[in-house]
Amino acid sequence: MEEELGLLLPCNVIVSVIEPEAMLSVVDRDEMQAIAGHVRGLLSQALAKIIQE
């Protein structure tokens, strides 16, 4: 991961978050839905931290 890449981004960057369940719904594997739920939680936490800043 390039942690310093954010330094190159303009101040007015719009952050969007995908819905992991929707993205992984095309894969017909039940275990992927559990992973998608976990990813959704991580994305929600990251977005909350960005909003707080």
Image (cartoon, rainbow, N blue to C red):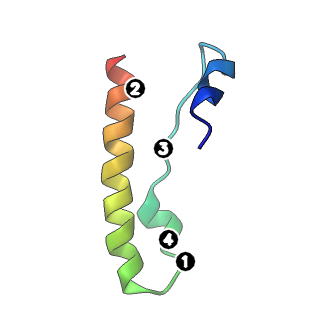
Q: Is residue 25 left or right of residue 31?
A: right
- The mark that comes first in sequence, 2 or 1, is 1
Residue 11 placed where, x, y %? 60, 13
Neighbour tally class for label 4: few under 14, some 14-19, many 20 plus, Cα within 10 Å: some
Q: Which residue is mark 4?
A: 24
Q: Amino acid at mark 4?
A: Leu
Does residue 29 sit above or below 47 in this rendering?
below
Q: Quadrant of the N terminus?
A: top right
Q: Which mark is residue 11?
A: none
Q: Residue at x 42, y 65 (%)?
A: 21
Does residue 50 sit above or below 32 in this rendering?
above
- The mark that comes first in sequence, 3 or 1, is 3
Under circle 4, the secondary element is helix
Q: Amino acid at mark 2?
A: Ile
C-alpha distance separating marks 2 and 3: 12 Å
Neighbour tally class for label 1: few under 14, some 14-19, many 20 plus, Cα within 10 Å: few
Q: Are marks 2 and 1 in contact (CB under 8 Å)?
A: no
Q: Amino acid at mark 1?
A: Val
Q: Are marks 1 and 4 in contact (CB under 8 Å)?
A: yes
Under circle 2, the secondary element is helix
Q: Which residue is mark 3?
A: 17
